[in-house]
Image: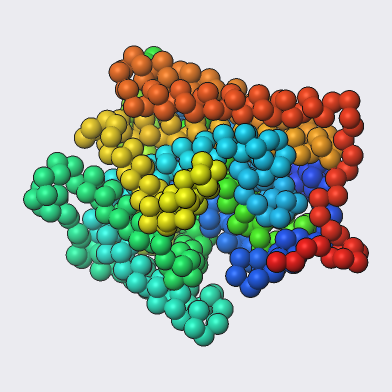
Amino acid sequence: MPAAVVAAVVGVLYFLGWRYYSRYLADHVYALDPAFVTPAHRFTDGVDYVPTNKHVVFGHHFTSVAGAAPIVGPAIAVFWGWGPALAWIVLGTIFAAGVHDFGSLAVSVRHDAKNIGTITKDIISARARTLFLIIIFFLLTLVNAVFAVVIGNLFVANPGAVIPIFVEIPLAIVIGQYIYKTRSAALIPSILGVIGLYALIWVGQQYPVDIAPLAEGLGIDNTRNLWIIIMFAYAFIASRLPVWILLQPRDYINSHQLFIALGVVALGVLVGWSTIVAPLVNDVPDDAPSVFPFLFITIACGAISGFHSLVASGTTAKQIDKETDARYVGYMGAVGEGSLAMGAVLACTAGVVATRAEWDALYPDFATASGGAVGNFVGGIGQFANNLGVPLDLAVVFGAVVVISFAATTMDTGVRLQRYIVQEISEIAGWRTGARNLTVAGLIAVVVPLGMALLPGGGDAGYTFGVLWQLFGTTNQLTAGLALTVVAVWVTKRGRNPIAVIIPLVLLLVMTSWALVVNLLTFIEDEQWVLAPLDAIIFVLAMWLIVEAALALRGMSGRGAPQAADAPRQDDPVGGPQR
């Protein structure tokens, strides 16, 4: 099957989803109102609450949600065959991710741009809010641990990527300072930053950085683990800096990288007329995880991701100019990430190897597929770039730089968000030090996922990554299901038909609960006495929150569900509260 044909068909399906299904959601489910006064206008402060052009908001939102996860998950999941992987990506993007991301954004806009965990208190109950925040803490722990492992493995396998990645930090700081002090637009400086970053790929190739001797001197038997420690030390420092110094300018640079990567995939498969050599459905070994439920948690970002609800609510929502912009930003953000996931499938089935026998050697079992997934994508994207005339050795480093950049951006955002969650949970618990001391909250946000990244699996990178990815995927999809629960209750309270929300909600809760139970039994059998209790705690919290939501829906029965006036409209003479 020519990869270009698959890409074209998927592109048409995404267009139809955007054109028709997102319009249905906007008009009949979320009932967007162009006269609604958004939080960006009511609370304008020039810092967080800023009415922004929808195309600019889309760029920031897309960059924030499209980290390395829509690359890694599909790169693993093609183990079951490219057919099931691509089917879940496409259907999930159109009917689940679009509903979830769009809905989380719409709910947040109607609730003063609060995050989804806090909104849970208003829509369901205060107890449910606390439960949701704890689940979010576990999710962010696994997000940060997973991507630290991704970066560590890539630095070991691609030492030529070290110099470009680390020079990007001062490069981003210089760009941030220039933009902040001159009040200039970010477009030209960030494009120059990308050019500088890619010029450094050649330098990195000439001067690869291997820290194995340093790790040995420090008594660390795994070089990857030293890279993990270095990345968390960096993330702690970065999370304490104002966002305009490093986080935002890195996002500017990486937003261009994101579209460049998509362009390389599209042009690479077309110019090289690459053919998919992997099986449509793979005959996996008997001891491999079953496609049900594990396909649905292996591909999280790229089909549907609870992490997106954290970005959409409380961050993106503060920048929405008109409520109707939520359709474009939320639904199209999901489509963009689904496109990246499709690119990952093509890279690992049509780019990295040229024959079925070579592909079978890369995906003989699930452990090998998990451990080699990122490398397979890097090799595939390198081959696509090579089709465009880039020397293969430089093209492979380019692929590694793309993935590491995305993963590092996810870590930057994830550690910062986890610090916020630690402070919010501490405030609820009455622990004033955790709530107010940024250093203490930041240390918790770093030390907990660092321990998780270093603990399971010992020196076996594939086993460690496979275990972490399954836990991450399960918790991520569970968070998405719980966010959809909040959206479903909100839609029902407003007198709208919630069926479009309930269908993906039920699917996710069934698949994630199933996976949690299967993993729990496996962890107990393997005597994983850290992972087993963690799995059990997440499962119990999730079931508890679902009961809370069911009670909230039951409490509405018999009372009707009037259309809620969540906040002022533009024709309201008062105009709403001001901050």
Q: Is residue 28 above or below residue 464?
A: below
| Residue 551 at x, y percent in the picture | 72, 25
Q: Quadrant of the C terminus?
A: bottom right
| Residue 344 at x, y percent in the picture | 47, 44
Q: Is residue 277 above or below residue 445?
A: above
| Residue 175 at x, y percent in the picture | 44, 76
Residue at the image point whose x is 33% and y is 37% from the top: 452
Residue at the image point whose x is 65% and y is 37% from the top: 126
Name the residue at the left extreme.
Answer: 217
Residue at the image point whose x is 38% and y is 47% from the top: 444
| Left-right relation of 124 to 389 | right
| Residue 89 at x, y percent in the picture | 57, 38
Q: Is residue 36 above or below residue 253?
A: above
From the viewer's side, name the closer residue of 344 and 267.
Answer: 344
| Left-right relation of 166 to 311 | left
Residue at the image point whose x is 30% and y is 40% from the top: 451
Q: Dividing the picture into quarters, in which one does residue 454 lie?
A: top left
